[in-house]
């Protein structure tokens, strides 16, 4: 009988956490800290969405506030999901001695934050 941690022809049926070899725990913990940082960022976006919706009644029109709050909440949800995908992909790469996967999240997040900041600045100047 094959060891479930070894790569075999049943690669598709083996869960990713059983593939390859267990990585050094320090790298797994570092990967987990990165995951938690992404989750904190998602929570900050969600808190910002709630704050804008509930407390920023002088910031632009109601349509602008709702749009901004929905955009922040949507990105918060996406970041939460992408954080898990990134964590799992990094764990799998470490288990199978593969290169860590690249992510478009960093550029997308930077562009989104810049766009939101510019929109808020414009609304503050126009108010």
Image: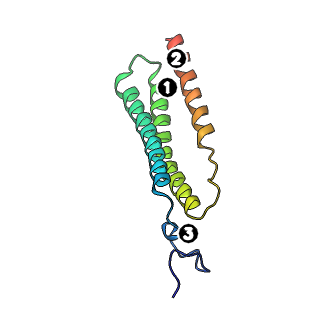
Of pointers 3 and 2, the one earlier in the residue sequence: 3
Q: Quadrant of residue 118?
A: top right
Q: CA distance from mark 3 to mark 1?
A: 49 Å
Residue, disc 1: 64
Residue 123: mark: 2
Res. 7 image quadrant: bottom right
Mark found first going from the N terminus, 3 or 1: 3
Element carrying mark 2: helix
Mark before the other along the chain sequence, 2 or 1: 1
Element type where label 1 sits in the image: helix
**Residue 91 spot, x, y in % from top left:** 52, 58
Specify few, some or many for label 1: CA neighbours under 10 Å numbering under 14, 14-19, or 20 or more: some
Point out the frontmost of discs 2 and 1.
2
Residue mark closest to the camera, 3 vs 1: 3
Residue highlighted by disc 3: 20
Q: Residue at x 51, y 57 (%)?
A: 88
* Residue 49 spot, x, y in % from top left: 42, 32
Question: What residue do we see at 55% from left, 55% from top?
Answer: 90
């Amino acid at each position: 009988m094959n060891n479930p941690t070894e790569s075999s022809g049943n690669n598709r049926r083996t869960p990713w956490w059983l593939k390859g070899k267990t990585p050094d725990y320090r790298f797994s913990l570092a990967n987990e800290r990165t995951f938690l940082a992404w989750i904190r960022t998602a929570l900050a976006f969600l808190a910002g969405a709630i704050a804008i919706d509930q407390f920023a009644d002088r910031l632009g029109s109601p349509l602008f506030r709702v749009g901004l709050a929905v955009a922040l909440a949507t990105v918060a949800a996406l970041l939460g999901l992408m954080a898990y995908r990134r964590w799992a992909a990094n764990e799998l790469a470490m288990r199978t001695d593969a290169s860590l996967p690249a992510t478009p999240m960093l550029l997308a997040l930077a562009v989104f934050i810049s766009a939101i900041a510019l929109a808020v600045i414009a609304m503050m100047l126009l108010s």
